[in-house]
Amino acid sequence: MASKAPVFEKIYQDYLTRVADQDLIKKQDILGIRVEGQTIVIPFFNETFSIFPRKIEDHQGRRPPHSVCVILCQYLLLSPDDLDDDKQLVTYRDFKDAAPYVQGFDNTAQQPVAKAFAGRLIELEAGCRHLGGTSCDIGISCDLSYVFEALPRVRIYLVFNDMDEDFPADCKLLFEKQAAHYLDMECLAMIGMVLAEHLTEKDNPNVARLA
């Protein structure tokens, strides 16, 4: 792992250099961000991050995980010139360029939640609320559904059916079609992974220790 650290640091600094070269003042409303001098303020799930010319910090001054840094920077670098407001819900595999990442998305995002919370619906609901999720009705039969604002223009929906005598627990993560207007497929898959990690992490105070 240590041998990879310099590579990650190089990627991190490269992203920051590219972001610093962007003129994002006119895109504040399109992206839902704030530009304050050389600082870009951007919410991600239920946290707020600050992107400076040479670093990214959360509200406690800590550098976020590499995956979060990549998502935040790509959101800024891929910023479109106009708004897209297509809120039709789709599965990840429905996106045009998602095919290479579909299995990974299932393995790192949907399956971990299904396995971790089988028979633990109350704990899952507590975890969703802790992460800033809002209970929602998307018009399909399920045991639980929550929506999260991962980024100002990218929402992710968690739809969960608990196990019963005939079927195992199942988790589906859905996006609005507009999500592909703001991020590439790799980053959308990473958003699902980050959500799953946050829900299942042991230090989540509202989720009982996993068995």
Image (tube, rainbow, N blue to C red):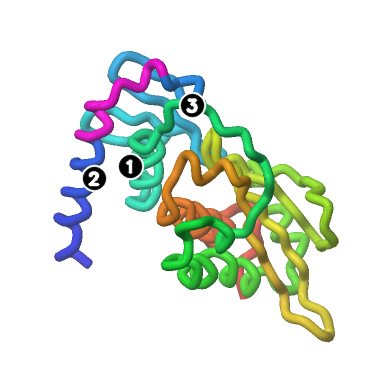
Q: Nearer the viewer, mark 1 or mark 3?
A: 3
Determine the residue positioned at 47% across, 66% down: 99
> Percent from the top left, x then y, of residue 2?
18, 64
- Magenta extent: 17-26
In the rendering, which numbered label is found on residue 63?
1
- Any magenta on residue 170? no
Determine the residue positioned at 15% across, 65% down: 3
Q: Nearer the viewer, mark 3 or mark 2?
A: 3
Q: Do the numbered discs 3 and 2 sit on residues whose CB atoms are within 8 Å?
A: no
Dot 3 or dot 2: first in sequence order is: 2
Question: What residue type is disc 1 on?
Answer: Arg
Does residue 115 sit above or below 2 in this rendering? below
Determine the residue positioned at 82% across, 58% down: 140
Q: Main secondary structure of the magenta part?
A: helix
The foreground one among 21 and 82 is 82
Q: CA distance from mark 1 to mark 3?
A: 30 Å
